Amino acid sequence: ESVRKMLFAMVDDIRVVIVKLADRLHNMRTLSALAPEKRRRISQETLDVYAPIAHRLGMGFLRGELEDLAFRYLEPEAYEEIMSAIESRRDENERFLARIKQTIETILRRENIPARIDGRVKRAYSIYQKLKRQRIGVDQVYDIIAVRVITDCVKNCYAALGVIHNEWHPIPGR
């Protein structure tokens, strides 16, 4: 009922949805105070309704946090295993990410390709989905780090891809 009302209100004013998303984020951050069954119900609703709405509104960071918080309560053992794997390699991954970003910036600058480079360590729920989809273990996930190259036009996008593939050759099937 709450979601239905929010969707109808959204037609008139998108701020209603933004307030509801902020409220849900706050609720998810304080969910530990509730009974386990209520935590699971709210977490499932968050994954099914609120995270996709945040995604559709271009609020990827909010979506990611909502998914990770819900994941924590829906699959606590898997959450702990993945978080432990991420944390054990955090420093190494951050250093590697900084080196990769610097290398990409250097080679794109050398080729006069204007671009912005973003990088991040992937979120726990995203990794979990990959584990389920590919039926692999956390030790078999090699792409915990993500790099995004944003250019000003399609031509430069393909030029950047070519330059990057010259530096790091694609692996077939991966």
Image (tube, rainbow, N blue to C red):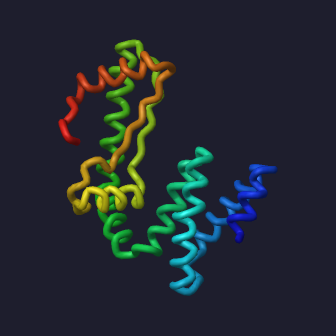
Q: Nearer the viewer, residue 97 or 67?
A: 67
Q: Is residue 86 left or right of residue 58?
A: left
The residue that appears at 50% across and 68% down in the rendered structure is 70
- In x, y percent, where is residue 78? 34, 70
Q: Is residue 67 above or below residue 78?
A: above
In this view, which residue lies farthest toward the right?
12
The residue that appears at 52% across and 84% down in the rendered structure is 37
In this view, which residue lies farthest toward the bottom?
35
- In x, y percent, where is residue 40? 51, 78
Q: Quadrant of residue 107?
A: top left
The residue that appears at 60% across and 61% down in the rendered structure is 50
The residue that appears at 37% across and 33% down in the rendered structure is 101
Q: Is residue 111 above or below residue 145?
A: above
Q: Nearer the viewer, residue 99 or 74?
A: 74
Q: How many marks?
A: 0
Q: Quadrant of residue 136?
A: bottom left
- In x, y percent, where is residue 166? 23, 22
Q: Is residue 113 above or below residue 59?
A: above
The N terminus appears in which quarter of the rendering?
bottom right
The C terminus appears in which quarter of the rendering?
top left
- In x, y percent, where is residue 146? 37, 43
In this view, which residue lies farthest toward the left?
172
Q: Nearer the viewer, residue 174 or 95?
A: 174
